[in-house]
Image (cartoon, rainbow, N blue to C red):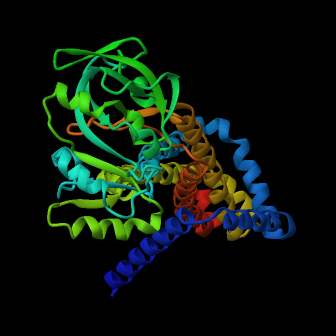
Amino acid sequence: MNHSKQLLAVLGTGGLIAAACGGWIFMNPATFAALIVLLVAWLVATRPGRLAAAMLGIALSTLRERTGATIVIIAGIGGVVAVLVALQSMSQGLQRTLHNTGDTQTVIVLSGSSTEASSFLTPEKVAIIAEKPGALQDRDGKAVLSAETLGVVRLPKKSSGARGNLALRGVGARAAEVRGNVRIVQGRTFRPGTQEMIVGVGARRVFAGLEIGQTVDLNNQRWTIVGAFESADAHESELFGDADTLGAAFRRPGYQSVIVRLAAPEAFDQFKAALTSDRRLDVNVRTTLDYYTSSRGTLVDTIHRVANVIAAIMAIGALFGALNVSYTTVQTRSREIATLRALGFDAVPVIASVMLETMLLATLGGALGAALAWSVFHEFTGSTFGADLGALIFQFDVSGALLWTGLKWALAIGFVGGMLPAMRAGRLPAAVALRAT
């Protein structure tokens, strides 16, 4: 019977802790603001609240005597928040970059493959694709498309000097019309039929030797960088050159993909049906938004899960640290608590004061971790390994919503870390507390 009661007590405590953590982590700002208003009103307008505020003031006045314990809580929780925000900002930045790449009015056509790297389209098939209904046409009735090739060039990184893979994309003469977001920010665009290239600003931030006027060796040929472009998407991680000239340099007679601008997003089904029903073609047709979002979506999901797992492990460590420090604090203050209980302070102000102290320290730790993550990772440039398609370069996205998430984790740790010691302090009889000292 006693074992059953103990088991129920453990399960009840575990459920209470889980519910408390979930409540804090999934709380929205409006609910948090309402809780703060209610707490302040309780502290000011009720006798237990005023007693709790008085006890909290006494506890805070003794923090200098407990510097080591205070630092343990603040640093531990700050570390959790900093790591969580850093890893999640990486996932969020990568996801934003992929989501910005492509749209629903441009289509990528591959030769029955799911990736550009393993696709091959002959010039004859490109001509057939250009004739299909649904594609945007110019005044001469020609489809607005770009037949493209994709390769990889190894260049040294600025940070370490080690060579990494950079994507090299050969594009058609109408690539600027197909991709309306590509904008030359320095120099000029390349001339078709020449060994000239333009570089994405993301690639230039990470790789050396890509300034205007510098050259890149490709298959024993020198290609000159003549401009830099912005696109606010994954293509900023690439070099652009003329597809036919690059194909001749690498002895590739065809293309790997065709990017087609549709007359309207609603024309996708018509265009896809026309391609897939043609027996001369065996192609995979997707919107560019769908293709780029899903091509590395697994990587984004993995980073997101890893961030949560690492943060959870660190949070458990910080939670046990907070529990240990809070229990020690309660033990150290037992004479003080006993005296206050003898003066008429009941359990509610004692419990509230201990929890408020721990949560205030947790808030400081959360703010410290958020500030650290912002100062280090705001607009920080990261990149994937790029074994097959070249490195994907992106900027970490330390958003306000992400900082709020980190603060909620800090509050959850502080709440749980202070709850059990506070309940113990509230149940401690005055006589027992006096004997313990």
Residue situated furthest right in the rendering: 45
Q: Residue furthest front?
A: 140
Q: Residue at x 64, y 57 (%)?
A: 354
* Relative to 309, 201 lies left or right: right
| Residue 174 in picture, x, y percent from top left | 40, 40
Q: Picture coordinates of residue 334 (x, y %)?
A: 62, 55
Of the pair 59 and 333, the residue shown nearer to us: 59
**Above or below: residue 199 compared with residue 89:** above
Q: Is residue 343 visible?
A: no
- Point out the image quarter for the N terminus: bottom left
Q: Is residue 201 left or right of residue 290?
A: right
> In the picture shown, does residue 301 fall above or below 149?
below
Q: Outermost residue toward the bottom?
A: 1
| Residue ID at (62%, 49%) | 363
- Asked which quadrant contains residue 364, the reply is top right
Above/below status of 107 relative to 393: below
Report the number of discs.
0
Residue 251, position as x, y percentages in the image: 13, 30
* x then y, percent, for residue 286: 32, 60
**Picture quadrant of residue 128:** bottom left
Could you tell whether 73 is left or right of 346 in the image?
A: left
Q: Is 133 or 157 nearer to us in this picture?
A: 133
Q: Quadrant of residue 345?
A: bottom right
Residue at 14% in and 37% down: 253
